[in-house]
Image (cartoon, grey):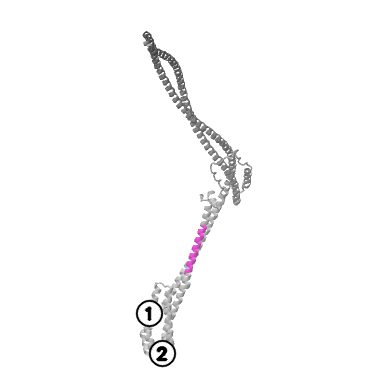
């Protein structure tokens, strides 16, 4: 009983009373039914059989009397009266047989059934004998009728009368047994009634004891409930204040993290632009390096060409030197030819003209060779200068190519750094996003905690009122009403949760505010245990 709840104890007591009432009712119905069956058997069936047995006994006696009356009236020649006695005999026999049939239909025991069968068998034995007796009477043969009566009819007819008397005596015995059973049933009903009454009083005493124990335990638990309600109210007030501060700080933190997230997005965008510019510069520098390689190759080809030109010019200078020598020899030959023509006189005049022309031609060739040699010398000088300059340009191009290579390496490093920077900024942005989500969840949870604290404070007030009502029920004085009003007043005076400076877009679905469970009769199973 100590570990049962109030509901279970009350239900147990009520169940015990209900069970006892059901047992009393069933026992009462059973005893009444048994007594009714006994009364039905005694007052209806047995009485009716006793009445029918009396009719059978009277009919047997009347049959014997009617048969004797028939014989007496025949002896006195009163045939009309004798005929009436015959009719009476037939009526009494029919009554006898009908009584036997009715008794059998109501129901009899083995001894009664044997008597009924003997009586019917005896009547069946009497019928043919009586028919011969009646035929003699109807023929006005009194002597024959007397002879049949004395020799055959008197004894079985008397035996039939005796059997009818036995049936009546047997039914008297059955009636006596039924009376005894009825008396026993009445006595058993009285005993059962007193026994059930004692059990009912014991059950009522047990229920009263349970109620007294419940009232005592309920008093103790009401006092404990009142103390617990005071502690819950104090804790609810502290939780409410802390939840409101936490909600306010979480809202401000969410706003600051949102601003940080926006700045992080701008930094990420700038880092992506820097990475894109670095990739573009890397492409341009790569193109410049390729162009520098191509220019260096072209300059080398130009140097090679100028070297070839220098070599060709030197060969031309050698050829021109040969031509100059040939012109000099030709001029000498022309002079010799002119001398010989002068010696020849008129015969060599034409040859002298040719020699003059050859000499002039040789002189012009020598002059042209000298001019060409001078030009070739200038060209060689210029080619040497150009080669020197081109070699300087090649060296500058090599240095420029090296610079471009270094620039490309630096741009590659800048691009890699920008890519890593973009990845780092993205990670920072994702981390800030997660922080923002967590902060918003914390803010939502803080607001829900504040709402739950409000509900808890309201429930503590309701708990105070409930403790007061329970105290009033069991006669315990509590301060629940005043404490409840004070708790409600102190909670209503607290400021509401301050909203954030900037609106924060919620990223999670807020949890449902817990609904307080109303106190009622259906919830006391989880309320307290004794």
Viewer can see residue 13: yes
Q: Nearer the viewer, residue 142 or 249?
A: 249
Around disc 1, counting alpha carbons within 10 Å, would you say few (fewer than 14), some (14 to 19), or many (20 or more)?
A: some
Distance from Cα at disc 1 to Cα at disc 2: 25 Å
How far across and down, in percent of the image, does residue 369 sit?
42, 15
Q: In the displayed structure, would residue 175 be above or below residue 270?
A: below
- For the view shown, which residue lies furthest in the bottom direction? 77
* Label 1: which secondary element: helix
Would residue 528 be counted in the magenta stretch?
no
Quadrant of residue 318 within the rendered picture: top left
Which of the two labelled residues, at mark 1 and mark 2, occupies the earlier sequence position? 2
The residues colored magenta run 16-37
- Rendered image: mark on residue 122: 1
Q: Which mark is residue 291?
A: none
Front-most of 101 and 366?
366
Q: Which residue is mark 2?
A: 74
Residue 421 makes an appearance in the image = no
Q: Position of residue 344 (x, y in %)?
A: 36, 9
């Amino acid at each position: 009983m100590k570990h049962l709840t109030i509901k279970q104890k009350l239900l147990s007591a009520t169940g015990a009373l209900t069970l006892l009432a059901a047992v009393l009712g069933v026992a009462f119905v059973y005893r009444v039914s048994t007594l009714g069956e006994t009364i039905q058997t005694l007052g209806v069936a047995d009485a009716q059989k006793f009445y029918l047995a009396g009719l059978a006994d009277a009919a047997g006696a009347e049959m014997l009397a009617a048969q004797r009356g028939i014989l007496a009236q025949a002896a006195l020649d009163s045939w009309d009266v004798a005929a009436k006695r015959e009719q009476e005999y037939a009526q009494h026999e029919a009554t006898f047989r009908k009584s036997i049939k009715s008794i059998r239909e109501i129901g009899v025991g083995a001894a009664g059934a044997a008597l009924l069968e003997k009586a019917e068998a005896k009547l069946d034995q009497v019928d043919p004998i009586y028919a011969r007796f009646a035929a003699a009477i109807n023929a006005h043969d009194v002597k024959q009728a007397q002879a049949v009566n004395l020799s055959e009819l008197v004894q079985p007819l008397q035996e039939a009368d005796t059997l009818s008397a036995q049936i009546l005596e047997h039914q008297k015995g059955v009636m006596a047994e039924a009376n005894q059973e009825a008396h026993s049933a009445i006595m058993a009903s009285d005993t059962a009634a007193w026994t059930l009454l004692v059990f009912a009083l014991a059950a009522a005493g047990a229920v009263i004891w349970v109620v007294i124990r419940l009232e005592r335990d309920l008093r103790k638990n009401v006092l404990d409930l009142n103390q617990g309600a005071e502690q819950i109210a104090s804790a609810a007030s502290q939780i409410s204040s802390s939840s409101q501060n936490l909600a306010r700080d979480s809202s401000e933190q969410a706003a600051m993290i949102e601003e940080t997230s926006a700045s992080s997005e701008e930094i990420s965008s700038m880092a992506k632009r820097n990475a894109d510019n670095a990739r573009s510069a890397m492409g341009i520098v790569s193109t410049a390096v390729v162009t520098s390689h191509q220019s260096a190759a072209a300059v080398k080809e130009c140097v090679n060409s100028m070297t070839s030109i220098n070599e060709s010019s030197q060969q031309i200078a050698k050829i021109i030197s040969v031509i100059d020598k040939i012109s000099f020899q030709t001029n000498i030959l022309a002079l010799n030819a002119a001398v010989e023509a002068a010696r020849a006189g008129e015969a060599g005049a034409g040859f002298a003209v040719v020699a003059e022309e050859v000499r002039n031609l040789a002189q012009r060739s020598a002059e042209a060779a000298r001019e060409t040699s001078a030009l070739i010398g200038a060209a060689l000088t210029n080619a040497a200068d150009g080669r020197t300059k081109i070699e300087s340009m090649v060296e500058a191009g090599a240095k420029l190519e090296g610079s471009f290579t270094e620039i490309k390496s630096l741009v590659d490093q800048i691009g890699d750094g920008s890519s890593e920077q973009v990845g780092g900024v993205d990670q920072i942005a994702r981390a800030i996003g997660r922080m923002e989500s967590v902060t918003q969840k914390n803010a939502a949870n803080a607001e829900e905690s504040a709402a739950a604290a409000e509900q808890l404070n309201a429930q503590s007030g309701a708990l105070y009122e409930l403790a007061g009502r329970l105290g009033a029920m069991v006669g315990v004085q509590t301060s629940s009403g005043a404490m409840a009003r004070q708790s409600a007043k102190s909670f209503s005076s607290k400021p509401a949760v301050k909203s954030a400076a900037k609106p924060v877009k919620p990223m999670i679905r807020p949890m449902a505010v817990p609904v307080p469970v109303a106190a009622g009769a259906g919830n006391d199973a989880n309320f307290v245990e004794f």
